[in-house]
Amino acid sequence: MANERIRALIVDDEEPARENLRFMLEDLCPEVNVSGMADGASSARRLIEELDPELVFLDIRMPSGTEGLDLLASLPR
C-alpha cells in the first residue's frame, strides 16, 4: 500500500494551465499520478466517474457554463 500513488484529475479550461500543473506535479510530487485532465465541467464529471480520483485540482471559473464550484457541489460526497 505504501507504494500506491494518489490518483489526481486536473480540471481547467486553459490547456497551458493544465499542462503547467501536470508538469509541476510530476516534477515535485512523485506520490501524485495525474490520471486525467479535463477542459470543462462535463468532461470532468465523466472522468471523475470513470477514474475515481482521490484528488481533483479544479478551476473555479470556466466559461463552459458550469463553474468549478457548481461542479463540486453537484458531486456525491
Image (cartoon, grey):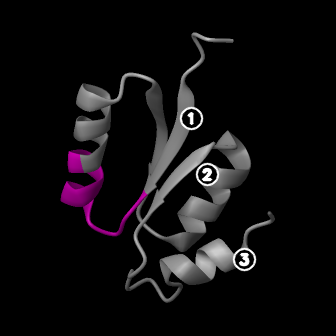
Specify which label sits upstream in the sequence, 1 or 2.
1
Q: Quadrant of residue 53?
A: top right
Foreground mark, 2 or 3, reads 3
Specify which label sits upstream in the sequence, 3 or 1.
1
Q: Secondary structure at mark 3?
A: helix
Specify which label sits upstream in the sequence, 2 or 3.
2
Characterize the magenta stretch by its predominant secondary structure: helix
Location of residue 14 in the rendering, given as x and y in whole percent from the top left corner: 26, 66
Seen as rendered, the residue at the extreme right is 76
Query: In the image shown, does 29 or 48 lie closer to the viewer?
Result: 29
* Discs 3, 1 touching: Cβ within 8 Å: no
Give the residue number, with chain letter if any, for mark 3: 74
The relative height of residue 34 versus residue 65 in the rendered view (above or below) is: above
- What segment carries the magenta color? 11-20
* Discs 2, 3 touching: Cβ within 8 Å: no
Q: Residue at x 70, y 45 (%)?
A: 50
Give the residue number, with chain letter if any, for mark 2: 47
Give the residue number, with chain letter if any, for mark 1: 7
Identify which amino acid the numbered label 3 is placed on: Ser
Identify which amino acid the numbered label 2 is placed on: Leu
